[in-house]
Amino acid sequence: MSSISEVADLQISNFANIGAFALLTFDFFITFQDEVKWTWFRPWDITRVIFVASRYLPFIGSALTAYDALSLNGPVTPARSQAENIIHIISIVAAEALLVIRTWAFWQRSKRMLIGLVTYSV
């Protein structure tokens, strides 16, 4: 009975990963026009680099995760698993940095707020 439960849990996890990738792709298509309008023709600075990392690295990580979910080739190699984890971590850190920058800008670039946000983020 335990092995049936484990297989069901694995299947649910695979479906959730594929569903998350579909939602990410859907979000990309409905916001692409605004992205072009507001970011593509702006000069490159640290904020834009963070935005690009937080916007496009999740596609790579999610695609690799979805591939693993659909793959029938057996277990994932440790090197590929580690690469996926690094991509996911960089994506999360970039999204967090983008949130800190947005919050700091909302608070009129207060140095006290920036110190608090960076301290809290770390």
Image: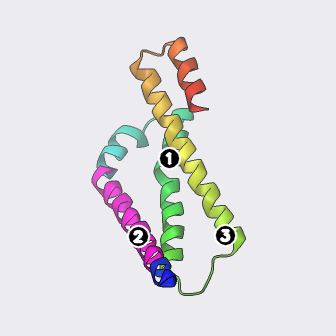
Q: Out of 52 and 120, give the one closest to the viewer.
A: 120
Frontmost of labels 2 and 1 is 2
Asked whether the beta carbons under mark 2 and mark 3 sit within 8 Å of each other, the answer is no
Q: On the image, numbered disc 1 is attached to which residue?
A: 54
Residue ID at (72%, 69%): 79
Q: Quadrant of residue 46?
A: top right
What's the residue type where badge 2 is placed?
Ile
Range drawn in magenta: 8-31
User: Residue 73, position in %: x, y?
Assistant: 59, 87
What's the residue type where badge 1 is placed?
Ser
Q: On the image, numbered disc 2 is attached to which residue?
A: 18
Mark closer to the chain start, 2 or 1? 2
Mark closer to the chain start, 1 or 3? 1
Frontmost of labels 1 and 3 is 3
From the viewer's perspective, is residue 92 above or below residue 38?
A: below
Q: Whole-Å distance between the Cαs marked 2 and 3?
A: 18 Å
Mark 2 residue element:
helix
User: Residue 37, position in %: x, y?
Assistant: 33, 41
From the viewer's perspective, is residue 20 above or below residue 43?
A: below
What's the residue type where badge 3 is placed?
Arg
Q: Out of 44 and 79, give the one closest to the viewer.
A: 79
Q: On the image, numbered disc 3 is attached to which residue?
A: 80
**Residue 23 lies in the magenta stretch:** yes
Residue ID at (45%, 74%): 9
**Residue 60 lies in the magenta stretch:** no
